[in-house]
Image (tube, grey):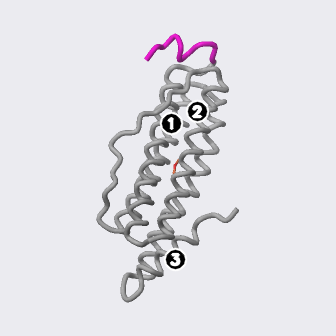
Amino acid sequence: METSIIRKNTSLSEEIITVLNQQIAVEAHSSATYLAMSSWCHLKGYIKSGEFFRHQSEEETVHKMKLFDYILDMGAQALAPEVQNVNNYFDDLKSILDNFLEMEISITNRFNKIAKKCLESGDFQTFSFVQWFLDEQKEEEDTARRTIEIYELIGIELDGLYQIDKAIGKLIPQP
Ligand code: FEO
């Protein structure tokens, strides 16, 4: 990493630029993972869940670009992420939903750590910027938990999986 380029004309510290760039990569990885989940759902006939995860994938791209633009707006270098080790194979719908919630909780933990670092280093501008992500994570976690509740409430007896798929599709925000 060429520090001189990364830090040119910016009030952001090297440490904050690094964690924000790392988060760009995490968002890109989440976007690719949700796309893989979308594909798996479509293949298995869970069309509505496939649409749901495609929407989630697009949301992660929005998050990635929000971080990217903030770094650029602050005069530092945003790094285009490499996306590796994306899992495309899943056991069943339930394991996808569990994985979804785990990923969102892990992202919340990452943003809490970023916010803590901002406070410790006196970077109140970035601290204010990450508040949007912390609010967003509350919604993302809530949605992920809801998918699991739907799965457990409906159950897989009879046409349960069909009904679960339909109910998950209804979680896609309407424009
Ligand atoms: Fe960008 Fe779902 O966290």
Which residue is tagged 3?
166
Which residue is tagged 2?
68
Q: Residue furthest right?
A: 175
Query: Which of disc 3 and disc 2 is earlier in sequence?
Result: 2
Q: Which residues are magenta?
A: 1-10
Q: Residues within 10 Å of mark 1 (few under 14, many from 20)?
A: many
Q: Which three-letter amino acid code belongs to the residue tagged 2?
A: Phe
Which residue is at a point 31% across and 61% down the rendered structure image? 90
Q: Find residue 144 and report its horizontal and vertical position in percent.
A: 49, 62
**Residue 28 within the magenta-colored segment of the rendering:** no
Which residue is tagged 1?
24
Asked whether the residues under the numbered discs 1 and 2 touch, taking CB atoms below 8 Å apart as contact, a structural biologist would say yes
Q: Residues within 10 Å of mark 2 (few under 14, many from 20)?
A: many
**Mark 1 or mark 3, which is nearer to you?**
3
CB of mark 1 near ligand 1 (< 8 Å):
no
CB of mark 3 near ligand 1 (< 8 Å):
no
Which residue is at a point 32% across and 43% down the rendered structure image? 85
